[in-house]
Amino acid sequence: MPAPFIVIFSAIQNRIIHQVPEIAHIALDMGQLNTRNRPQLSWPCLLIDFEHFSFSDLGAHVQMATGTIALRLGTAPLSGTGQNTPEAYRTKALSCYNLEAQLHMALHAWSLPGDYMGAMMRTSVRTQSRTDGYHVRELRYTLSYEDNSTRTEQQMAPVSMVVNPVIDL
């Protein structure tokens, strides 16, 4: 069985491909938007990362994981949004918020496949401060899941039962 983060990443990626096809590039966040020598990206892009996961023991080496999935929705520089900008250009520049809303509708309260996965719940959204003209929104969702990867099989001790068919009254 693949590692839980691989299962989660793949499920989110597939969900977005089908629910928000306008997003042209979906990948693991490896810092692609943080460098001047940015690798080739298609826009809009969505970068996914797993941050701040904590674990508690449930017994038999099973753990409950709860943490944050960070999504960075990036859009390429567009025209302005000022009152003197032609309406068609302003609408196009503001479309990033429609894309964000579509993304949220696809993911919020969505339960990932599998009996041990919980539902994703949005906890925060913020705009990343940038000077390069790219618009990047950071969306954070919480997720809990059972990590059964190190589960031990518990053996039940055999029980002997003696049945006495004779009842003395």
Image (cartoon, rainbow, N blue to C red):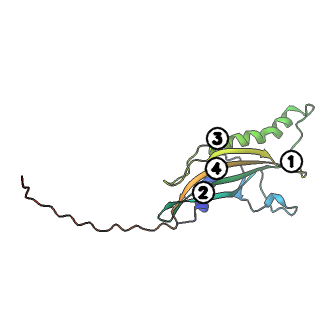
Counting residues from the start of the chain, the first of labels 3 and 2 encountered is 2
The foreground one among 91 and 112 is 112
Quadrant of the rendered image containing residue 48? bottom right
Per the image, the residue denoted by label 3 is 105
In the rendered structure, which amino acid carries the disc numbered 2?
Ile
Q: Secondary structure at mark 4?
A: strand
Quadrant of the rendered image containing residue 78? top right
Between circles 1 and 4, the one closer to the viewer is: 4
Counting residues from the start of the chain, the first of labels 3 and 1 encountered is 1
In the picture, the disc for residue 77 is 1
Q: Are marks 3 and 2 in contact (CB under 8 Å)?
A: no
Q: CA distance from mark 4 to mark 2?
A: 12 Å
Tell me where residue 5 appears, x and y as whole percent: 61, 61
Q: CA distance from mark 3 to mark 2?
A: 18 Å
Q: CA distance from mark 2 to mark 1?
A: 30 Å
Q: Is residue 156 above or below residue 48?
A: below
In the picture, the disc for residue 57 is none
The foreground one among 107 and 40 is 107
Per the image, the residue denoted by label 4 is 142
Per the image, the residue denoted by label 2 is 8
